[in-house]
Amino acid sequence: MDFESLALEYKTPLYIYDFEHIKEQFESIKDAFRARKSLICYAVKANSNLSILRYLGKLGAGCDCVSVGEVKRALIAGISKYKIIFSGVGKEDNEIAYALRQNILMLNVESEEELKRVEAVAKYMEIKARISVRINPDVDAKTHPYISTGLKQNKFGVDVDTAKKLYIYAKSSEWLEPIGIHCHIGSQILDIEPYKEATKITAELLKNLKALDIDLKFFDVGGGIGIRYKDEITIEPYDFAQAVLANLGESDVTVVCEPGRFLVGNSGYLLTKVLYEKKNGNKRFVIVDAAMNDLIRPGFYNAYHEIEAINKDEQKTSKADVVGAICESSDFLGKNVSLPRLNHGDLLVVKSVGAYGFSMSSNYNTRARCAEVAFAENKYRLIRKRETFEDLIGCETECLVRGNL
Ligand SMILES: Cc1ncc(COP(=O)(O)O)c(C=O)c1O
């Protein structure tokens, strides 16, 4: 990556994504499931840029969405409606209706009340709703508590017994068609065992349901495969696929998986410019033009991202906290980072920010969100322009003072 030219052309802070890497990741997971019918539904929440969705769609991906906005993004990006899944614990009636009208592959139901609402909306629309039920297998994914989703104390899914009841109910309903079963136990998972446990529980239910003449076609194992941010030992796609398939036996189902981070995480770079250096006592701070509104993961989860100075030959380094301009002490991109002496205008790059980077960014402190650039076929292309101040205030319709600005 030619970070200096990128900074000159597009300014900083700037997100850059290596599309070739996204392709390699997609192909590795698709290939791992080659022995079975499979559908890789990219978890849009990881990075919802339309160009990324379109690119993945062209490779054959579907989309896992958690809001009607994400469903709309997937459709606009050209994803086949039969490859779109709508998950999430709090779907509103209008969201359910939109998904049904668009005839997407299935709605992934997460509670009894939700199932009844889907049924009611489907009845009103006189459409049969294709559904799956999300199982909460009460399995510890051994990840950060904020991104663990498969334990009883997490809000997601329903236990196996409840799921069985929901399937029996759905089977008897004129307006529901159960076609899938789903389980997603968390994110940034580095241990294969929780996957084995969770898929075993889900596959057992699949078999039990078949015995009740409820013949599901899609077995969705969720996402969550971890990536290397520092020195983590990650799960190989082949081992992941084997862990899933070993539990499926001869069941004639399409295996669905919903990777987000795995597909885009390591593809992303956040380029930022040094504004100032300062010391409070012995503590060194490097203040940059990116901040927690651009990348909240360090402040939110204490997540680690490698940070490197661009084109600095100086061997001598010292530890510094790399911080933004936001009025929060959690506004840091890295702590105790070894960096050479830096001057105003020097560039730093924050790595592995392709997932949950831009998509979790905000306008906090009335800061415009930065631009995004794709690196594909040896060319850089702007895929989202930098926001302006006018974009930020554009929705504030009651602003009586605007004429005075
Ligand atoms: C239902 C569901 N599927 C897939 C994902 C993607 O997870 P990851 O990005 O870790 O692969 C998530 C993330 O929260 C999710 O909630």
Image (tube, helix red, strand yellow):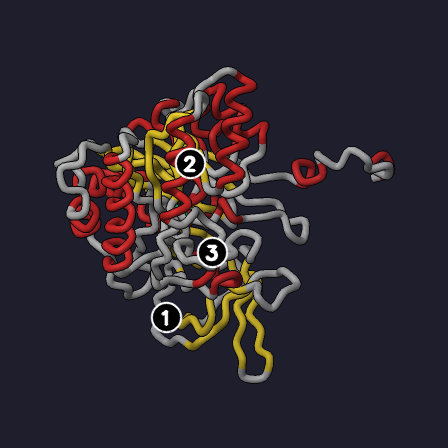
Q: Could you tell which of marks 1 and 2 lies nearer the N-terminus?
A: 2
Q: Which mark is residue 179?
A: none
Query: In what element is the residue under mark 3?
Result: loop
The kind of residue tagged 3 is: Asn
Report the residue at 39% width, 23% height from top. 81
Mark 2 C-beta to ligand 1 under 8 Å: yes
Q: Nearer the viewer, residue 343 or 405?
A: 405
The kind of residue tagged 2 is: Asn
Q: Is residue 115 above or below residue 232?
A: above
Q: Could you tell which of marks 3 and 2 lies nearer the N-terminus?
A: 2
Q: CB of mark 3 within 8 Å of CB of mark 1?
A: no
Q: Which residue is mark 1?
A: 314
Residue 20 visible, this angle:
no
Q: Nearer the viewer, mark 3 or mark 1?
A: 3
Q: Is residue 350 above or below residue 162?
A: below
The kind of residue tagged 1 is: Glu
Residue 52 rendering spot, x and y as whole percentages: 39, 35
Report the residue at 23% width, 40% height from top. 207
